[in-house]
Image (tube, rainbow, N blue to C red):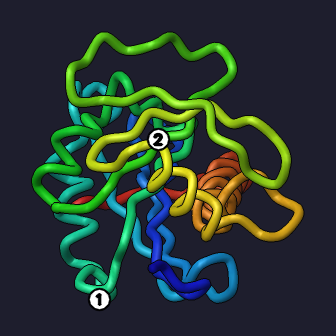
């Protein structure tokens, strides 16, 4: 049984000056923000899995996470292998699909239309069945929202990074 305060991690991204900044946000259900972290990758990279995997594993809340939720902004079918993340993290991974998303032909990915706050949402999921995906997704949503809070806040932070970098000319340094 999952509690209202089940920890979920939301991922989003933005591209600034040829680099992609991946933003992760940990929420306790839809109630409390628990943590924020970022990593920088080259936009030309074909696969972000290794950097995203390290970002998640280094999170202070990693041992308490119950699911990874990925924004449609991160373009999961091209840059992130959700079945690979689910296998390596041993956690369910649910990617929100944009309205224009195509069905993937990948073996270990399930495509569902789930219900959140009375609205249908298209998702791809690995490591979880339809009922589990709907429960995990629903725990992350506020009472009137159909996007989990962790993903919504990660998207807002990614948008703000974009806006700030355009206005102030921010430089990114990678280690």
> Tag 2, which secondary structure?
strand
Residue beneath the point at 53% across and 35% down: 123
Q: Nearer the viewer, residue 77 or 116?
A: 116
125 to 172, vertically: above or below: above
How many numbered marks, from 0 up?
2
Residue 37 lies left or right of residue 87; in this view the side is right
Instruction: Please give the name of the residue rendered at 84% of the width and 69% of the height, measured from the top-left corner.
Output: 143
In this picture, is 42 found above or below 22? above
Residue 12 - label: none
Residue carrying label 2: 95
| Residue 83 falls in image quadrant | top left
Task: Answer yes or no: is residue 175 visible.
Answer: no
| Residue plotted at (48% across, 84% down) | 35
* Residue 136 in view in this figure: yes
Dot 1 or dot 2, earlier in sequence: 1
* Mark 1 secondary-structure assignment: loop
Give the image location of residue 162, x and y in percent.
Answer: 64, 48
18 and 87: which is toward the camera:
87
The residue indicated by pointer 1 is 60
Residue extending farthest to the left is: 88
| Rendering coords of residue 106 (x, y %) | 25, 18
Instruction: Specify the quadrant that holds the N terminus.
Output: bottom left
């Amino acid at each position: 049984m999952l509690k209202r305060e089940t920890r979920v991690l939301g991922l989003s991204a933005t591209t600034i000056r040829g680099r992609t900044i991946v933003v992760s946000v940990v929420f306790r259900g839809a109630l409390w923000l628990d943590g924020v972290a970022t990593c920088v990758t080259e936009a030309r990279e074909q696969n972000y899995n290794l950097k995203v995997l390290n970002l998640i594993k280094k999170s202070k809340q990693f041992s308490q996470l119950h699911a990874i939720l990925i924004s449609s902004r991160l373009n999961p079918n091209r840059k992130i292998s959700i079945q690979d993340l689910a296998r390596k993290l041993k956690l369910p991974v649910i990617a929100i699909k944009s309205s224009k998303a195509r069905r993937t032909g990948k073996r270990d990915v399930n495509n569902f239309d789930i219900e959140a706050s009375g609205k249908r949402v298209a998702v791809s999921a690995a490591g979880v069945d339809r009922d589990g995906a709907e429960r995990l997704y629903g725990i992350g949503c506020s009472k009137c929202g159909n996007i989990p809070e962790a993903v919504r806040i990660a998207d807002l932070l990614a948008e703000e990074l974009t806006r700030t970098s355009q206005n102030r000319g921010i430089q990114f340094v990678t280690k």
